[in-house]
Amino acid sequence: MSFTVAIDGPAASGKGTISRAVAERFGFAHLDTGLLYRAVGARVLLGIAPITAAQELKAEDLDADDLRSPEVAQSASRVAAIPEVRQALLDFQQAFSRRLGGAVLDGRDIGTVICPEAEVKLFVTASDEVRAARRHAELTGKGLDITLGQVLADLRERDARDAGRVDAPMMVAEDAIKIDTSEMDIDTAVETACAEVAKLR
Ligand code: DC
């Protein structure tokens, strides 16, 4: 039987960590859909046209270096506003969501567009400042030279674009459960999410 957990939210809200933990706890497969857009965004930075990059995306593109860089994140957010790019990635995501044994997908439009019938929908948020601090620690930990102010401006720019686009904007699905992780450590956030999944599992 398929069982889908849709986890949406803005950048650095904690949704990635929560999604991986939920998948591991319940034995579900996990798809980080942001990685698909990042892989397209990275190809565009190499000079490939966005729609072609999305239509010709291959599994090995998801292993490219630097997919986690701020430049690739911005490029991903820009290509994600193109309807044909989103369309090209739709079937793969929907097929993944119906895998036997259960699936967790995280992104921006999973509960609203990709899997409106998902059994569990979570929307993970945190304040801008908390998210920027987390992402800043992650990036400087990897040796990147970037200020907290730059990271905050970057996140806000991306959130505004992701929430403001016409096609599949980031938004809270009507039936989603909101989890604000601003004041939570990661263990608490994971337990809160797992408790919601367990109620419906
Ligand atoms: O989750 P992320 O930060 O890795 O995503 C990178 C960008 O990809 C994000 O700014 C917007 C886009 N994205 C999207 O439009 N829809 C998704 N389901 C996932 C990501």
Image (cartoon, rainbow, N blue to C red):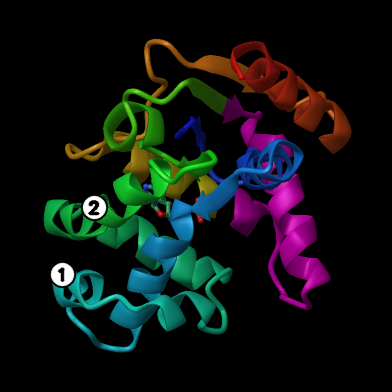
Task: Identify residue type, mark 1.
Answer: Ile
Up-down relation of residue 115 to residue 52 (above or below): above
Task: Kindly identify which numbered label has been placed on residue 71.
Answer: none
**Pointer 2: what residue?**
91
Magenta segment: 124-153
Q: Is residue 106 left or right of residue 175?
A: right
Viewer-nearest residue: 101 or 44:
101
**How far is mark 2 from mark 1, CA to CA?**
15 Å
Report the residue that reaches farthest toward the bottom: 46
Mark 2 crowdedness (10 Å alpha carbons): few <14, some 14-19, many ≥20: few
Q: Position of residue 183 (x, y in %)?
A: 81, 24
Report the residue that reaches farthest toward the front: 1
31 within the magenta span = no
Secondary element at image label 2: helix
Task: Kindly identify which numbered label has been placed on residue 51.
Answer: 1
Viewer-nearest residue: 138 or 91:
91
